Amino acid sequence: MVLDAANARLIAPAAAGRSIAPVAITTTITTTTATTALVTGKLDHLHATGPPTEVCMSSTVPAHSPAASALAAPSTVVHKFGGTSVADAERYRHVAGLLLARPESLQVSVVSAMKGVTDALIELAHLAAQGDAGWQEAWHALRARHRGAAVALLGEQVGDTVDWIDARFDQLAEVLAALAVIGELPREVLDRVQGLGEVFSAQLLGTHLRALGEDCAVLDARDVLVVGHGELGVDVDWDASAGRLAAWRLQHPQLRVVATGFVARDRQDRVTTLGRNGSDYSGAIFAALFNADELHIWTDVDGVLSADPRLVPEAVQLHALSYDEACELAYFGAKVVHPQTMSPAIRLGLPIFIRNTFHPGHPGTRISAERSPRGPVKGLTLSEDLALLNLEGTGLIGVPGTAERVFAALRQALVSVVMISQGSSEHSICCVVRAGEAARGRDAVVQAFSHELAAGQVQRVQVSEGVSVLAAVGDGMAGQPGVAARLFESLGRAQVNILAIAQGSSERNISVAVASADATRALRAAHAGFWLSPQTFAVGVIGPGNVGAALLDQLLAARPQLLAKANVDLRLRALASRSRMRLEADGLHEDWRQALQDAGQASDLDHFTEHLLAAHLPHAVVIDCSGSAEVAERYEGWLAAGIHVVTPNKQAGAGPLARYQRIRAAAAASGARFRYEATVGAGLPVITTLRDLVDTGDEVLAIEGIFSGTLAWLFNRFDGSQPFSALVAQARSMGYTEPDPRDDLSGVDVARKLVILAREAGHALSLEQVQVESLVPAPLREGSVDDFMARLGASDEALLARLHEARERGAVLRYVARLGPDGASVGLQELPADHAFANLRLTDNVVQFRTRRYCDNPLVVQGPGAGPEVTAAGVGALVIARAFAPASVANVAVGFDILGHAIAGIGDTVSVRRIDEPRVRIDAIRGSAVELPLEAAGNTAGAALIALRAALGLGFGFAIEIDKGIPFGSGMGGSAASCVAALVAANALLDVPLSREALYPFAVDGEAVASGGRHGDNVGPLLLGGVALCTADRLVPVPVPASWHSLLVHPHAVLETRRARQALQGSYALGEFVAQSANLALVLSGCHRSDASLVRAGLRDVLVEPRRAGLIVGFDAARDAALAAGAMGAGISGAGPSVFAWFEDADQARAAAEPVRAAFAAAGFDSEAWVSPLDTPGACLC
């Protein structure tokens, strides 16, 4: 039968859509043992909320299904409230308001005892049984608490309820007095006493609801629930319980029901409890019996968290869990529903919601059969107070039944096994047990293997105490590579040793045993590895002076934007000046100045480092703005420990050569980054530019420039109208100089910058080898700053005389640094008035690189300094990189698919960001006239990074944004430029970057997506720069004279690579291959010998061009125009339609541009032209 809960009438099974056998109701008399008769007699009426109606059910229904016999009701919701939710009168009111605001058709509320009452009742029973008269005082206090709650809730209507409470506390007193007489505490009596809290609680809430005008029934679960007790815990008698509930509902058809949690009756009709967490279990049982649509468990948190927030401040709320995930988490101690509670819900597919009583508007966590898409790991838990029991012996190898004997011995000793681990060698087997059971377990195993121990087949049975188990749980772990790697990498980074590992075949759980001393650090590190952005940094700043203060303000102001847009999370955990420091676990904020001033801690770099490394964050970075040699001494240790270093401090880069080499070696070994761009040129990309030149095979011949913004300003302003000393004082007041201007005027700072650049270019230069002209008079090099400033005027006349002498020669004075074949020097020099260094703006820095490629026309980097900004950018550069790759000419007429060169002036820019996902994604493509693939595998940039990730086994992924500058289908290597720029940017984000040659295979993989074949004639020259020979597995630079230039002309037409390749299908004569091979040999020989005549003889395509020329309107005329203008040779660039030509110098190439463009114009096409050295640099960071 089924009860219509709304109308309290029986419905025929057919009408209800269910098939339920007839149910017979019989009366049963409770029996007790003689020992407890005295006590239980006193309790006969103590539990009744109304007239006693003790009934049990006997049914002919086999294998009861809760779904088949639960009470049907539309929109039925069961709510369960824990002790904190009903701790006092105010909270009962809150719960009542929460319930009345909900629209359920049938509402069942299961309540726990008021907070602390169950423990108080248990204590009362034990005190009485022990004959301790103190139970009376505790009894009075407990009664007063309930009476007070009733009075506060009901006011003038409290009379009957207080009488009801008093009567039951009087009966409880009689029971306690009886326990004092018999001197023992039978289990049945304890169950009856400890369940009274729920009886009182249900009565209080139900009476309050009735006082508010609600028709509410109070259900004592002992009148309904029938359970048994077995080895696996409580076993619900669903048939009997459903029948009793049906009978109860016939008498109580109300649509609001308040039920007691925790308590029930056993099959002998004795009062019992459901054990700890029994109230939650009661909620699930009633949800099944009432056939509820939802079960809401109300607690004092917003839902299930990813970890214990007391241990992991960054723990996040989980919006959804599967039943399996919740069970795993609960087993290992997470604050989730007990697995037993979920059993009825799982059978019905009933969703469970974990909600916050005090934040009812929050949706909480939904637990259901559905799998949530969020991430592989849902939660991390920590089980403590454990021990590791290890059985080890050579005699165990290959012997069946060893594990069975171990666990049989433990079972016999009543030792519960928390975790099991065994290596495939079978040499040992270990398990984790409760610490209190470890000794008993060891003795049991020793006894079970006594023979083997005596015979030496088992070497040891060992217990290691102080063990905790960290468990990572999530349905998404199944079939997902790299999850375990991420967990172990996080623990390794936190210096946590793993004692044992276990993972089930479901792959839903990875458990690791660790030392308890490392447990919290392990939990935090693992949580950071799975939940925090992989771009989360523990930041420590040293030296909050001018640059440091500006950096801190900028860093903290930009933090929200960096987190929102780039997923970079910078946490300022440590700040140190010369005298004091401030360490904050939760991070410093915009009030860092006051926080540092209030710091009572003296600066201690050891403690500073320890605090930074103790963070459970993926990365740690020190930003050193101090200028201190003592701090620079720490770099090697920091980098070796995996701490990134970002600095404008020149002491490391220009200090002792041996130390500099150790610092670079430490960075290379650990993968930590050493970023010192701000040491030279302030905000200018000087070091990046130099590094790109060297990385792409260029040779640095000379470096010179003005490296000091202070000295640049001084000599820009020094025109004789003011004394030089007055300008120095003005610069100092404007903040342009160091606090002691001698640091600028001595020239040592400029010399350090020159040393840094020299070392970056590959020279083993030391500071002592630089000739330095100091502008500080010898008598003033010692003493106070004030004394120096007062006496500096004595040198004004000498400098003024040098200025006049320079003017007489039409020159200006500039403080210049030079590095060349004849050595290194810094000093005041006369420069022609039209020199590039003579007309700088204010504090501009300028650096000129003369290289093999940029010999006649040196590469110049010039601009204002901006130290704080570039230092902050150095932090971001650890996780975000941007690269530019130029256009290219592929094939070069004679080297089909194997020869190419770069083109200056046009290219693609790609930004790459490390992400906390094991994949590559493309977030944006801008600047393309056609729609390009956003799916990573179908895009050259994405495919290249997919190949890179797979080959290196990276645990992180990349997000790509592409800004196209090369037209689609132009024959200018647009797909290759995106591919190579992405690789160069991603390479900068690797812990150990690869060489350009090592990136080549991944570039070829990417290019294959666009061209359909793995050829490298576009990507190769973009990696190396200049002309490159690119075979299937080798990348070889081809030297060319610096004066040779190329002309590239692009008609505004599109020719897709695949269509151009289709034109090549067909048969070829052997003579064509021989002729083409001979031409290629002539061109390569001419390049190596710098012999233009050989190139002129060979730069003719006799194989591909005749088959493709017809696809390009105007090609013949354009090629002929280039040859007529003096080109060494000309042909189709790549697949076309662009045309290239080689010339012996830049002037010839520029002069040829117009006639070639005119040829295309005659064919009806507008066009663009680019002239660039054949030795043009390849891709570079920008």
Image (cartoon, rainbow, N blue to C red):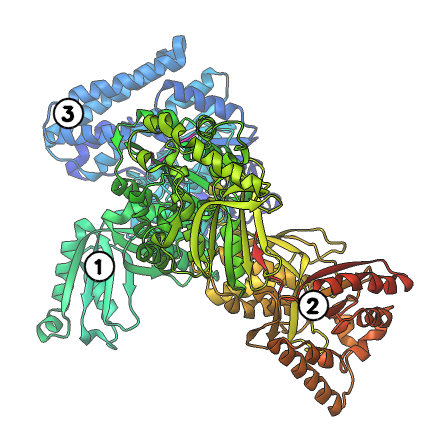
Residue 243, percent from left and from top? 44, 41
Q: Residues within 10 Å of mark 2 (few under 14, many from 20)?
A: many
Contact (CB < 8 A) between labels 3 and 1? Answer: no
Circle 3 is placed at which residue position? 177
Residue 411 shows which numbered tag? 1
Q: What amino acid type is highlighted by mark number 1?
A: Arg
Q: Nearer the viewer, mark 1 or mark 2?
A: 2
Left or right: residue 271 versus residue 962 is left
CA gap, disc 3 and disc 1:
40 Å
Q: Nearer the viewer, mark 3 or mark 1?
A: 1
> Is 173 above or below relative to 821?
above
Secondary element type, mark 2: strand
Residue 889 shows which numbered tag? 2
Q: Residues within 10 Å of mark 3 (few under 14, many from 20)?
A: many
Q: What amino acid type is highlighted by mark number 3?
A: Ala
Left or right: residue 253 versus residue 337 is right
Residue 10 shows which numbered tag? none
Q: Residues within 10 Å of mark 1 (few under 14, many from 20)?
A: some
> Is 548 above or below relative to 1086?
above
**Between 1173 and 334, the one nearer to me in the picture:** 1173
Contact (CB < 8 A) between labels 1 and 2? Answer: no
Q: Residue at x 73, y 59 (%)?
A: 1170
Residue 85 visible in the displayed image? no
Q: Reading the chain from its start, which is encountered first: label 1 or label 2?
A: 1
Secondary element type, mark 1: helix
Residue 814, percent from left and from top? 51, 42
Contact (CB < 8 A) between labels 2 and 3? Answer: no
**Between 193 and 155, the one nearer to me in the picture:** 155
The residue range painted magenta reads 584-589
CA gap, disc 2 and disc 3:
101 Å
Q: What amino acid type is highlighted by mark number 2?
A: Val
> Is 513 above or below relative to 131?
below
